[in-house]
Amino acid sequence: MAFTGFPAKVRYVPVPGPLFSELLEQIDDIAELKCTLRLMWLLHEKRSYPRFLTRRELATDQVLAKVLSSDGNDPQTAIDRALAAAVRRGTFITGPTRGGEASERVYALNTEPDRKALARVLTSPPRVVEGLQPGASDGPAERPNIFGLYENNIGLLSPMIAEELKQTEAVYPQSWIEDAFREAVSNNKRSLRYITAILERWEQDGKGDGRPLRYPKKNSFEERVRR
């Protein structure tokens, strides 16, 4: 059956850029590719932080089971094989949860913040994180740009969010942006709207020294957060 096309108001799901370059060149197994795409979608749907998936969640995902067992293989065996391939690739990381059953594992995207977050929920000792490439966390940390700050602290980018971030970067100093992200994370308010409201408050009322950056705003910080 041919695909009939995307609807007018289709949802877009952001994925990491390397998937369309080096990963696309490396992945030669269709099951691994399907598993990778499905896991990225499932992780994007998560509203909690850190974002990870348990093996039990994946076992009950009907789409994953269907696409990986199309050749007649047992669905759960096919899922395990595809997961193992994606972990060996380094696309995802995995490990057993604290005090849980041996079969209960969690999977996360292999990013620096997710590596740190996953280490906090894994069984200890030892902390076993599979899927890390040698030197993945070595070397001095680079100062993240506004896009890196968003992906590391809030979630994957979409074209609309990226455009808003560009506008924010053009108005506010980098140090303010970093501090606003830090304040939002500490308050567990992980949204661009909240971060923008912080910056606008500082612009109006002053940040530290009490002097506005450019010009006062009409609405208060609390009013902007409620909108």
Image: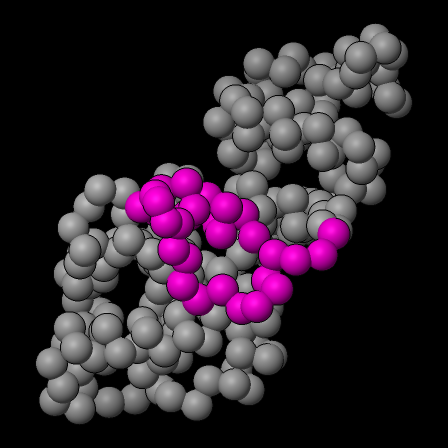
Residue 128 in the image: above or below residue 222: below
Please report the residue visible at 80 percent of the width from the left and 32 percent of the height from the top: 175
Q: Is residue 27 magenta?
A: no
Q: Position of residue 80 (x, y in %)?
A: 23, 73
Which quadrant holds residue 67? bottom left
Residue 113 in the image: above or below residue 29: above
Residue 70 in the image: above or below residue 51: below
Residue 94 in the image: above or below residue 161: below
Magenta region, residue range? 112-140
Is 213 displayed left or right of 89 in the figure? Answer: right
The answer to whether any part of residue 193 appears in the image is: yes
The answer to whether any part of residue 3 appears in the image is: no
Q: Position of residue 26 (x, y in %)?
A: 52, 85
Q: Main secondary structure of the magenta part?
A: loop
Please report the residue visible at 18 percent of the width from the left and 55 percent of the height from the top: 102
Which quadrant holds residue 200? top right
Is 29 displayed left or right of 117 in the figure? Answer: left
Instruction: Identify the image quadrant of the N terminus.
Output: bottom left
- 188 or 172, nearer to the observer: 188
- 124 or 224, nearer to the observer: 124
Colouring rule applied to residues: one colour
Please report the residue visible at 71 percent of the width from the left and 17 percent of the height from the top: 201
Which quadrant holds residue 54? bottom left
